[in-house]
Image (spheres, coloured by chain):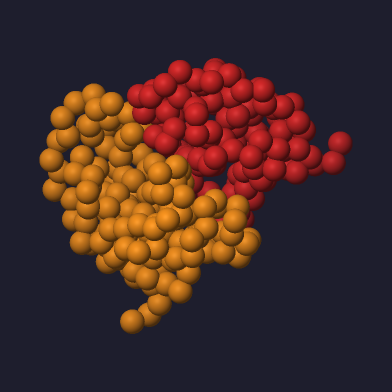
Chain colours: A red, B orange
């Protein structure tokens, strides 16, 4: 069965490493500050990784979180590795704002209000994420 | 403002360490194989932890995941650190089954069906989690 994260990037690629890539999610307009770390190999669960890979993975998740916090000052960061629909390891890193469409519920809950458009400098977040994680150019 | 994870355990305590505790969630009947790692200090975000603490935290999350996989063979493991309502660092570790009330949607989505009661040996999971994470008795 074809896996969309094996055959496609899964979003706008921000940085690639030999082990994983980070993409910005562009099909969730109510939550624009939404990144994913996608492991390159097709493994389903976080515990399928060996310890050094788990650490590299979470170091990168934290780098994304830190970029979002530093540049956007969100109300909260949400981290999740679910993969029920696409069981190929990926981590969601989402900046949440108190006036977003679901807050304080998870983004997968029923919307409570219309999304408030926000001027977010996502290009700056992309650049900081790439600089934090990527190999030197 | 009072924090319920500072003043209470947050579930049925499975194991305590100097840095965190693991509890089994007992108020989500549709998802009984649901554990939480709750950091003892009141910090909001995963990136508020220093690197050694982050590693200890995720090593324990993985130990919970491994116990769930080994003993319950779930369809998928879901990991999440959200904390929008209670911004005190905690990780959800949830065994998902293909016939649970929301699968494949996240547990926070609208139920798609009634929960199928399952005979799960959660006491065995508790014991394995405690043995994996806890200090020797």
Image quadrant where residue B1 sits = bottom left
The answer to which of A40 and B88 lies nearer the viewer is B88
> Going 30% across and 39% down the picture, which residue do you hit?
B96
The number of numbered discs placed on residues in the rendered structure image is 0
In this rendering, the answer to whether A66 lies above or below A24 is below
Q: Position of residue B116 (x, y in %)?
A: 15, 36
**Residue A40 visible in rendering:** no
Q: Could you tell me residue A112's position as x and y percent? A: 38, 24
- Is B50 left or right of B87, judged from the image as shown? right
Vertical position of residue A129 compared to residue B32: above or below: above
Q: Residue at x 33, y 53 (%)?
A: B35
Seen as rendered, the residue at the extreme front is B1
Q: Residue at x 36, y 39 (%)?
A: B76
Locate the N terminus of chain A and report the quarter of the image it occupies. top left
Q: Nearer the viewer, residue B63 or B84?
A: B84
Q: Nearer the viewer, residue A51 or B41?
A: B41
Q: How far across and how far down the image is residue B10, in percent?
A: 31, 58
Look at 39% across and 52% down and name the residue there: B65
Q: Is residue B2 visible?
A: yes
Left or right: B86 in relation to A74? left
Q: Position of residue A29 (x, y in %)?
A: 54, 18
Q: Quadrant of the C terminus of chain A?
A: top right
Point out the residue furthest to the right here.
Answer: A137
A117 shown above or below A91: above
Could you say which is closer to the camera, residue B40 or residue A115? A115
């Amino acid at each position: 069965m074809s896996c969309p994260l094996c055959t496609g990037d899964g979003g706008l690629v921000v940085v690639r490493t030999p082990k994983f890539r980070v993409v910005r999610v562009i099909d969730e307009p109510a939550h624009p500050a939404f990144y994913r770390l996608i492991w390159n190999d097709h493994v389903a669960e976080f515990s399928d990784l060996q310890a050094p890979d788990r650490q590299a993975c979470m170091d990168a998740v934290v780098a994304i979180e830190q970029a979002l916090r530093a540049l956007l000052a969100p109300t909260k960061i949400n981290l999740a590795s679910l993969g029920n629909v696409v069981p190929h390891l990926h981590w969601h890193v989402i900046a949440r704002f108190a006036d977003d469409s679901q807050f304080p519920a998870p983004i997968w809950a029923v919307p409570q209000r219309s999304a408030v458009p926000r001027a977010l400098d996502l290009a700056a977040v992309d650049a900081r994420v790439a600089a934090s994680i990527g190999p030197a150019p």
